[in-house]
Image (tube, helix red, strand yellow):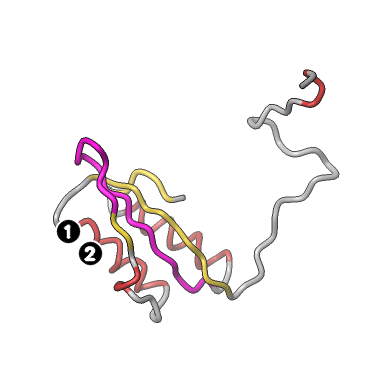
Amino acid sequence: MSDDKLRDLRQAPAANQTAPSITFPCDYPIKVVGDAGEDFTATVCQVVLRHDASFDAESIEVVESRTARYLSVRLTLRATGEEQLKALFADLKATGRVHMVV
């Protein structure tokens, strides 16, 4: 592959490229990574329920890191708009236990 075909992912997209759009409402999968602890999953579920009252906590998947230091909570919520997602991400980070939301 020639160098002119490589793209630096740290750069903003070219002017003729647009960010992918999401059509709301939709089922929106997220992964929340944070410090492992007995109540981490419950904390994540409480925050998500504040933003999506129809959230089903039975559908989550919890994966422990190799060192058991972190947990990854994978879930799907009903997203109604960008504002809801931004508020959800902010509330998750505000717990002080979440390191990343993907």
Residue picked out by circle 1: 39
Q: Position of residue 20 (x, y in %)?
A: 70, 55
Residue 23 horizontal side relative to residue 56, left or right? right
Q: Residue furthest top?
A: 3
Residue picked out by circle 2: 42
Q: Position of residue 59 (x, y in %)?
A: 34, 70
Asked which secondary structure carries label 2, the reply is: helix
Task: Say which quarter of the image contains residue 5.
Answer: top right
Task: Tell me: residue 101, above or below residue 57.
Answer: above
Packing grade of label 2 (10 A; few <14, some 14-19, many >=20) is few
Residue 86 horizontal side relative to residue 3, left or right? left
User: Residue 18 colored magenta?
Assistant: no
> Is the C-beta separation of discs 1 and 2 under 8 Å?
yes
Residue 84 horizontal side relative to residue 69, left or right? right
Task: Say which quarter of the image contains residue 49.
Answer: bottom left
The residue drawn where x is 51% and y is 66% is: 28
Residue 90 horizontal side relative to residue 66, left or right? right
Three-letter code for the amino acid on which mark 2 is drawn: Ala
Three-letter code for the amino acid on which mark 1 is drawn: Asp
Stretch of the chain drawn in magenta: 63-79
Main secondary structure found in the magenta portion? strand
